[in-house]
Amino acid sequence: MKKIIRIVLILALLFCALSCAVGTYMCKYALLPEEHGNDIEGDRAKTEGRYPGIIAWYDSLHTAGIFKDTTLIGEGGYKLHAIYSSAQHPAEAQGTAIVVHGYTDNHICFLNLVRMYRDSLNYNVMVPDLHYHGYSEGKAVQMGWFDRLDVKRFGEMAHDIWKDDFMVVHGVSMGAATTMMLSGDELPGYYKAFVEDCGYTSVWDQFAHNLKDQFHLGPWPVLTSADIVCQKKYGWSFKEASSVAQLAKCERPMLFIHGDKDDFVPFGDLQKNYDAKVKGYKEMWIAEGSEHAMAYKDHPAEYVARVRAFLDKAKSF
């Protein structure tokens, strides 16, 4: 009997050690990707390929000093970078838009939305590089959870610059999750609306989907172990970082967008997120035939029209 107990204990210890090692690897794989928005030239080329002429548009405005660079000290004491610009017609600016990029992206990757807000909708724009992305410092990807606090800081900076009383936060993918997570916090009154495009329900749900899709593994014990590592190393948990939980507290207008062919952030997350917001005005738009983060690329005119109509309605509340 003692021998059996000893073998069981040894096997249990080996299992725990293996789980810890796998969890550490999983945490590093997800939160310390080799490319994390730091290949600026590569992202410039990719963005130009999707939207021909957009890099020339941005470069000309940046060279002229219309787009400016700025920094602030974010969560954890890291220096964070952003670009910003006044609306195309500043005297008639409709408000301010904070555009939030996705996982392993940077301020360059969604210049299409920046141009939409600045030129088509005539909004001032602020575009951060999130923690550990682009030109910003940081020690790991935060998947939107602490990023929401950094976006709030950039919102405060934008308000100090333009003194607007109407601000919209618009995020894509991880940026959409950041937007939803921010929406449930106590915020200044000038935060009036949110647009989320293909955001996940929670970090736990997203990583569980990735594990199943890419490695054919369930969440236990790998994800459970990785979550423990993340809590100890970075101070937040995968389940805590929940769009759904934050949406339940959101009372301000929100537009939910998702492509029905999205299999990276599952299309089903759209309904779960939408249903989680039980207070205040909300709209949903399903981008037919669109894969992950491709709603604007596939339906540019409708995308702009729907965002414009939503913001016009949000201004009536």
Image (cartoon, grey):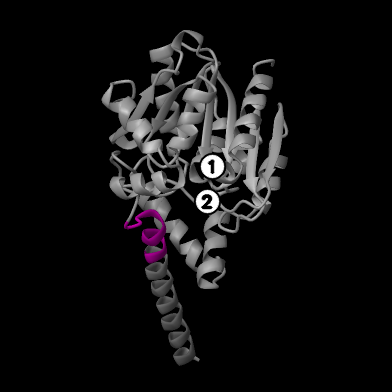
Asked whether, in this view, residue 308 is left or right of residue 44, the answer is right
Out of 280 and 11, give the one closest to the viewer: 280
Residue farthest along the top direction in this orientation = 91
Q: Earlier in the sequence, mark 1 or mark 2?
A: 1
Can residue 71 be spotted in the picture?
Answer: no
Magenta stretch: helix, strand or loop mostly: helix
Question: What's the magenta region?
Answer: 25-34
Q: Tell me if residue 162 is in the magenta stretch.
A: no
Distance from label 1 to label 2 (Cα)? 9 Å
Q: Secondary structure at mark 2?
A: helix
Give residue 168's position: percent from left, percent from top: 54, 25
Is disc 2 surrounded by few (<14), some (14 to 19) or many (20+) residues within 10 Å? many
Out of 185 and 287, give the one closest to the viewer: 287
| Residue 115 against residue 38 in the figure, above or below | above
Identify the image quadrant of the C terminus.
top right
Mark 1 highlights which residue?
A: 177
Residue depicted at 63% across the width and 46% down the height: 258
Mark 2 highlights which residue?
A: 203
